[in-house]
Image (cartoon, helix red, strand yellow):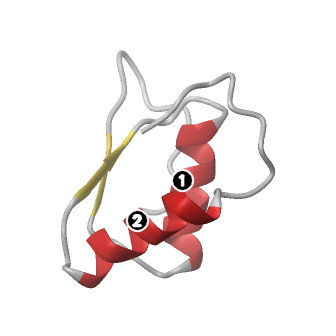
Amino acid sequence: MGSKTFKAAEVPPQVAEKIDEATARKMTVIVGEVPGACRLYQDYLKSKSYSNVIVGHAKSMRYNAGS
């Protein structure tokens, strides 16, 4: 979902709107787990108690905000 160079402290409103649309439609959200945007998006989804999330990773899981 995003870059590890992303330094924002919160999900930009335009992105939050798109994530909210996807979750309202009960879509599966696929997100990475590297620091930066991926972790921020994971934390956002967790704050919304959204669990239809797949966390992708290259070799080993470093971060998973949900279960």
Whether tag 2 and tag 1 are in contact, CB under 8 A, the answer is yes
Using residue 55 as the reference point, say whether residue 16 is left or right of it.
right
The residue under label 1 is 41
Q: Which element is circle 1 on?
A: helix
Amino acid carrying mark 2 in the image: Ile
Q: Position of residue 10 (x, y in %)?
A: 73, 57
Q: Which mark is residue 4?
A: none
Callout 1: 10 Å neighbours few (<14), some, many (20+)?
many
Determine the residue positioned at 45% across, 32% down: 61
Determine the residue positioned at 56% across, 29% down: 34
- Decide which of 53, 61 is in the foreground and name it: 53
Using residue 3 as the reference point, say whether residue 58 is left or right of it.
left
Residue 65 appears in view: no
- Decide which of 45, 59 is in the foreground and name it: 45
> Residue farthest to the front?
14
Q: Position of residue 66 (x, y in %)?
A: 47, 63
